[in-house]
Amino acid sequence: MKHLRSIDELGYDGVVRLLELTRHMVEINARPVPKVPALRGKTVVSLFFEDSTRTRLSFETAAKRLSADTMTFSVSTSSVNKGESLRDTIETISDMGVDAFVVRHKSTGTPWQISEWTNASVVNAGDGWHQHPTQALVDCFTVRQALGIERFDGLTLTIVGDIKHSRVARSNITAFSMLGANVVLVAPPTLLPPDVAHWPVTVSHRLDDVLARTDMLYMLRLQSERMSQGHVPSLREYGETFGLDAARAAKLPATAVIMHPGPMNRGVEMLVDPSALPNSLIHQQVANGVAVRMAVLFDLLAGESSTAYLASVAS
Amino acid sequence: MTRGERIVFKSGRVVDSRGERVADVAVEGGVVVEVGEQLSGSRTIDAAGCVVAPGFVDLHAHLREPGKEEAETIETGSRAGAKGGYTALVAMPNTDPPQDSVAVIDFVREQGKRAGLLEVVPSGCITLGRQGETLAPMAELAAAGVRIFTDDGNGVQDELLMRRAMEYAKGLGVTLAQHCEVATLTKGAVMNECQCCTSLGLPGWPSIAEELMVFRDIELARLTGARVHFLHLSTARSVELVRAAKRDGLPITAEVTPHHLSLDETRLTTFDTVFKVNPPLRSLADIAALRAGVVDGTIDALATDHAPHPRRDKELTLDQAPPGMLGLETALGVALGVLDVSLTQLVRIMSIHPAQIAGIDDRHGRDIESGAPANLVVFDPNATWQVVPESLASKSRNTPYVGMTLRGKVRHTIYNGEFTVFDGEAQR
């Protein structure tokens, strides 16, 4: 694998391979000294054109635990603000000797453009409303771990909220479908994409109708600007209609798990303290984020030696 | 062509509004002097198998001068046009400064004359600075020779202002060309609103944003009696609206671009910014409807919307990269490839109709007969060639047809009796 840009490109075999590899990384992270020399001498650049705390820290931690060198490029201090073209930025950093770019950008497709301009691997850490493949791997891994299963056949994933503007939703719909889940989307029509009928999902506009048949509940963050853009009349009304409160949580089957990609909007989509929910996987999602990103960087950068090395760490 | 030289194009397929026939065409002193058989001259050029037609007229070229000479100049754009078989280009007004004053109009026309490759016909702005707030000095511009007005790049959003513009234009006897886009519906839009944009998570440009303005302006034209031309129509419903308006006898004309006839929305799945264009590439159903509109005459003209951009601008991200693609040098080949029309109909949409819409039909798009100005194109409709960006005459390289093989090659372009292109090569 050269790049990780979308779940579609990764494919079923790729998803399963990375989820398996993640188990080894979880094991490494549980050691007293969670650090291995697998990527010594490799350089990973974080290229974040959009604000991010957890994803950037998660990737940087993952790179360091594999002994890669890291560089951070932040847009506020860069020459991008001086009118430098994206291509010039990429070529300049590439010239310094880089093995992987971890990219977040508000524009769809940026990781594909960047991979045209560099020989380094490109990892998509979120492009526009399009894809966030490592988040989907984190979520699949977290459910596998929590439920002790490998496939999700017969299970229903219900994604609630701003599907239209969500790269997390787009990646998760594909990844969970690949592993056998039925996917239900719940949102007002204003927060659904225009041609959702062609997706392999069912759509509901009423959260209360689908809770009883939900095995995995995925709450998306609602950004406050959706109100000024007229997608919802008010955050209060959104919370009342699509937020998770104690009464709604009680309608879920006892075994159902609850996820959120963070950061949460308490009082909007989360009207209940998630730590009070018995089956919340929100903390596991964050913890597994580092292991998944270690697996991704390892898979992209360890090269020929990866199989042998894997055998040694697994023993 | 030296003075007094009589050039004869031998045995070409002469195509004009009257149809097609094989004949010799003699040109002398800047005009066609004789059409017939067995003509002789001081110089003869074999045109057997080639079409001899009135030179093409483009209603929609962004020549970027003044203001963005890094992308194109009037000279390089003229050269690209001549290589594409054009003898006249309507220069779009979104220059910097914009074409809303006589000084800029005169500058653009003079630069065209200096280049001397074809006639550069400046359009004027409908509103000052294309801001959609105050009418441009349309009477002054009309007195300076402007026949067609547009805020292209922007649609005139305000209904009252558009009504006033139409009323005013009617008094001046000029045409208003509208870029149909209701801006509130397309904020941030990158591609057609469709199945693809749903999956790619790209903000969609819905068809209705175009159709609402087409409908509005048809009704305003009905009210005011003004002549209205619709630029770069892209949707099936727009074609339907124009068809109905013409059935009602309204003074409406419409154009379509080669790219909207040949490329569909899925091109953007590669995230290549060369395919970002405004209005966006649409669905296969829209393409079929646009082609049908050309065939049945609903669409009057093929117009390139030639929109050069320098490399560094197209190497931005999809949301930031400017919309637009080159068109002048590939229009003929694309049109021949995708349109199931006669050569006569092709010449109508590429020369005769656009010359009439631009108000230059006294000298362009004329029937090929004795006394007509010698603005001609000679092209081989069967010759194929490959699109190589580096060999384009345009200063920019943003063609969507890279590497494609097109059928239909311009051999010669004759402007005012002079070869601007001879055997495929620009002469100046």
Image (cartoon, helix red, strand yellow):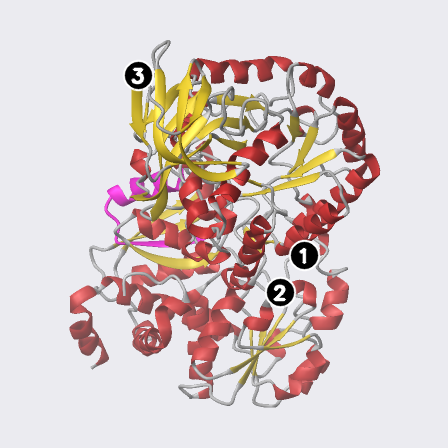
Q: Answer left or right for B185 relative to A23.
A: right
Name the residue that disc number 3 marks. Answer: B42
Crowding near pointer 2: few (<14 within 10 Å), some, many (20+)? many
Q: Is residue A290 visible from the viewing direction of this image?
A: no
Residue type beneath disc 1: Arg
Q: Quick one: B36 or B25, which is closer to the camera? A: B36
Q: Is residue A127 visible from the viewing direction of this image?
A: yes
Which residue is found at the position 26% from the left and 49% from the top?
Answer: A98
Q: Residue A197 at x, y = what percent?
A: 59, 72
Name the residue that disc number 1 marks. Answer: A226
**Residue lying farthest to the top in this orientation:** B3
Figure check: B172 above or below B274: above
Q: Disc 3 vs disc 2: which is toward the camera? A: 3
What is the spatial separation of the Cα atoms under label 3 and label 1, in whole angstroms?
A: 74 Å
- Kindly indicate whether the residue at mark 1 contacts the one at mark 2 (C-beta within 8 angstroms): yes
**Mark 1 element type:** helix
Q: Answer left or right for A217 relative to A98.
A: right
Name the residue that disc number 2 marks. Answer: A162
> Which chain does the numbered disc 2 sit on?
A
What is the spatial separation of the Cα atoms under label 3 and label 2, in whole angstroms?
A: 75 Å
**Residue lying farthest to the front in this orientation:** B38
Q: Residue A185 at x, y = what percent?
A: 61, 74
Q: Residue A278 at x, y = what percent?
A: 58, 83
Residue type beneath disc 2: Asp
Please provide the residue range marked out in magenta. A85-107
Which residue is found at the position 42% from the left and 59% from the top?
Answer: A125
Which residue is found at the position 70% from the left and 46% from the top?
Answer: B214
Residue type beneath disc 3: Ser
> Which chain does the numbered disc 1 sit on?
A
**Mark 2 element type:** loop
Q: Disc 3 vs disc 1: which is toward the camera? A: 3
